Amino acid sequence: MAVYTELKEEVLRDFLSSYEVGELRSYTGIAEGIENSNFLVETTRDRFILTLFEKRMNPEELPWFLGLMTHLAEKGIACPQPIMAKDGRALRTLAGRPAIMVSFLNGRSLDEITPEACEQVGCSLARLHEAGRDYRAERPNALAPEGWGELFSRCTDGGDDRVAALISGTGTALTAIVDSWPGVDSLPRGQIHADLFADNVFFQNGRLSGVIDFYFACTDFLAYDLAICLNAWCFRDDRHYQQDRAEALLRGYEQVRPLTVAEREALPVLCQGAAMRFLLTRLYDWVHTPAGALVTRKDPWAYQRRLLHFQEASHV
Ligand SMILES: Nc1ncnc2c1ncn2[C@@H]1O[C@H](COP(=O)(O)OP(=O)(O)OP(=O)(O)O)[C@@H](O)[C@H]1O
Ligand SMILES: N[C@@H](CCO)C(=O)O
C-alpha cells in the first residue's frame, strides 16, 4: 500500500491550478509501490501520475531524476515525462512533501514473463543506455558495493533463527564479490535504471509500452543494469533460472548495444553483485520494518537463492 499521505480535494485543486493541465475530474490513490505516495489524477485534459515523495527520498536528488526522465522522454524513451508547472518548474511542494506530476503511461506490468518479453526488455534497456549517453550529470550509486558492508552491519537477526542463518551465510559472499568487483574504469559506464523489475515495465498488446520508477537510477556500469535484469526477469518461482529468458534478454540488448568482451567476462560477478544488492536491501527492510506496518516486506531469501545460482553457474 503506498498512499502514506492523504490528499483533500480542495488542496489538490489548488495545486493543479499552478499547472496548465485542465480541471480536476477525479483522483485515486494507487496501492502498488512501497516508496512514495502515488495518485492517478484525471483532469479535463489528460491523465497524470502525482507522486509525493516520502521520507526515504532526499529532495536534493530530485532534480537529477527529473532531468534524466525529461532527457530520456525527449529522446523517445517511453518513460514518465515530468510536467512543468506554469512557472517552468516540475518540482513543487504538496502536503508538506516534495511533489511532481508526470505523464501517465498506458499498459500494465506482466503477470507472466516470457522470453519474448525479456527480449523486448533487453532492447529497451539498451535504448535507455544509449539515450542516457549525453545526460552528463552523474549520480553515484548509493547501493554500490562500497556501501554494502555498512548496510549489512545494520542487519541484526532479532532472535530469528532463519534471519540469523541468512546473515551468517552472507558475509563471506559479500567480501568475495566486493574483492572481485571490476575497477571503476574497466567497463563502460553511464546512466542506469538500476531497478528494472517486472513491476516497473508496462506492456500493451504484447509490446513493451513504458518503463517507470527511476528513483534508483544512477551512474554506474551499464552491464550492471543488465545483471539486475538477469536477476529480476530470469528466474521462475524465485528459484529456477530460465536460460531461454536470459538468452532472449541478452539478445534483445545486443541488438541495440553489443557488449564488449570485458562486459561479457564481468557479467557473472555483476550478477552476483546484483543479487547481493537486492538481498541486502530486502534483508535490511525485513529486519527494520515493524510487524503490522502497512508495507509488505519483500523476501530476501529469493535473492540468496539467485546469489547461489550465480556463484555456482559457469556462465550467465
Ligand atoms: N507514469 C505512470 N503511468 C502509469 N502508471 C504509473 C506511472 N507511474 C506509476 N504508476 C503506477 O503507480 C504504481 C506505483 O508506482 P512506483 O512503482 O513508481 O511507486 P513507488 O512507490 O516508487 O514503488 P516501488 O516500491 O516500486 O519503488 C505502479 O505500479 C503503477 O501502477
Ligand atoms: N525492486 C526492489 C524494490 C525496490 O524498488 C526489490 O524487488 O527488492
Image (cartoon, rainbow, N blue to C red):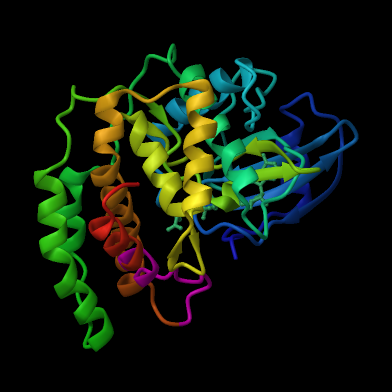
Residue 159 x/y as whole percent: 21, 88
Q: Quadrant of the N terminus?
A: bottom right
Name the spot of residue 90 as percent of width and height, x first: 59, 26
- The percent position of residue 88, horizontal first and vertical second, equals 62, 16
Residue 269: image quadrant is top left
**Closest to the observer, 18 or 107:** 107
Q: Main secondary structure of the magenta part?
A: loop
- 179 horizontally vs 299: left or right: left
Is 292 on the left or on the right of 206, as rendered?
Answer: left
Residue 51 image-quadrant placement? top right
Q: Residue at x 54, y 32 (%)?
A: 252
Q: Is residue 146 left or right of residue 207?
A: left
260 up-or-down from 304: above or below:
above
- Asked whether the viewer can see residue 201, the reply is no
Q: Foreground: 124 or 100? A: 124
Is residue 301 shown in magenta?
yes
Residue at the image point whose x is 18% and y is 66% from the top: 170
Q: Is residue 196 magenta?
A: no
For residue 184, say whether it is visible.
yes
Give the answer, above or below, for where 304 lies relative to 106. Answer: below
Q: Position of residue 268 (x, y in %)?
A: 27, 45
Q: Does residue 185 appear left or right of residue 127 in this picture?
A: left
The vertical placement of 180 against 231, above or below, is above
Residue at the spot x=11%, y=53% of the render? 176
Task: Report the residue at 19% width, 52% height from top.
Answer: 148
Residue 99 or 209: which is nearer the viewer? Answer: 209
Image quadrant, ligand 2: bottom left
Range of residues picked out in magenta: 292-304
